[in-house]
Image: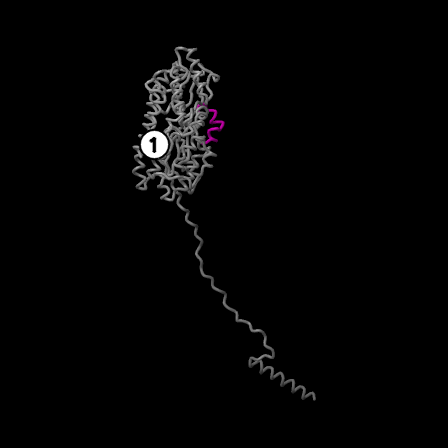
Amino acid sequence: MKKRLFALLSLLVVASMLLVACGQKPTEAPATEAPTEAPTEEPTEAPTEEATPEPVTVTIWHGWSGAYAEEYQKIIDEFNASHDDIQIEASQVDNLSDALQVAIPAGEGPDIIEWVQDQIGRNALAGNIVPLDDYIDMDYLESNFEPAAVKAMVWNGQIWGIPESQEGIALVYNKDLIGEDQLPNPDDFDGLMELAKKFREDHPDMYYLCNQGLGNPDAYHVAPIYFGLGLSKYGGYIDDQGNVYLATPEGYAAAQWIADFRPYAPAETSHEICKSMLTEGQAAIWWTGPWAIKDIEDAGINYGIAPMGSPFVGIKLFMLTQNAVDRGHDQAALEVMKYFGTAEVQKRLSLVNKTIPANSDALNDPEVQAIPTIAGFGASLNRGTPMPNHPYIDCQWGPVGDATTAIWNGSQEPKEAMDAAQAAIEECIANMQ
């Protein structure tokens, strides 16, 4: 029995060995994949730094000179040092009108023009500059700049610039001859008349006031009278649509005031006559601008400055050229223009050159207000009417100056003189169109 069992077990062992040798298993295990070789990594290039884009060079043509130009260059150098994406290049150009007529059509003009507001309409019509309504709005202007400066940027319903500085006239008076209590309220022309009359009565050999537009053809210096007595609401003698406003109730009233004022002021005037009268003690007030201050200071006059009426306000500004848009420089140029319009920049320029800032925060800065000329003229210009920015500007000077002189010397009645000036200006405008 044991022998049979042993024999049987032996057969089973042999059979199992044969099955293994033939590759068969009593129970199949899950198949496993043969191991694969490790993937070979493709060689990769070392990372390279992205090329730095070239900065946009924004070009400016301007008329700066002297200490003003030097301070501007410092401001530009500081801007360039702090900006990798924009660099400013500024060039002084003596005759901008002629230069632009050649350069802009050829695509060789600047990106920005620094000029005065009476050039807006002319250059817009010539296609030299572009409106800024796609870049800034009236809220930006009104929240940053003085009233006359804001109005001066708008022509034909569009915005054409960013203001830089402003200039105009005020009452410059001799404090040794009159005190503040002898100055008129800026809106009270009847009060001005009474003060002039009383001063003349008290000082028969002297005059209260000298204005070179009263007794000399000069539409600029008499503007505070016409505008202060009502023409300011029309924007001046002429609006940007070519409408003339001398033959209006306000124009007639101003003309009559001039006729009534004649007995209390010198018969003939000029810049030199008025300067001599103030510096030699023959007049208590010279109705003039910042350009006269050096002569007054050199004469040792103890002077003050006060507002009266609504003077013409000249504005310097920055304009964007068509060339800048064509080059794709418009956004960079706008950044530069807005930078020059900031209170920080305009304050610096004002402290260096005693210019009157167009930026309201700069003008009202305590350091700036501490300069008497800026504070005095700034208060006057805050009430002012901007110099025209339309192409009809040249039509006003001769007719208004001649009409005022005719009223002053009595050769024409006030209404007659205003009607004649109205007709002359309208004819000039018609010939232009």
- Determine the image quadrant of residue 160: top left
Q: Is residue 217 visible?
A: yes
Q: Which residues are magenta?
A: 359-373
Specify whether residue 293 is painted magenta. no
Q: Count up the numbered dots.
A: 1
Split into 4 quadrants, where in the image is the N terminus? bottom right
**Relative to 244, does residue 7 appear above or below in the rendering?**
below
- Residue 218 appears at what percent x and percent y? 35, 23
User: Could you say which is closer to the camera, residue 361 or residue 158?
Assistant: 158
Amino acid at dot 1 = Tyr
Specify whether residue 372 is painted magenta. yes
- Residue 420 appears at what percent x and percent y? 33, 25
- Residue 221 appears at what percent x and percent y? 38, 23
**Residue at image mark 1:** 392
Q: Residue furthest right?
A: 1
Split into 4 quadrants, where in the image is the C terminus? top left
- Determine the image quadrant of residue 103: top left
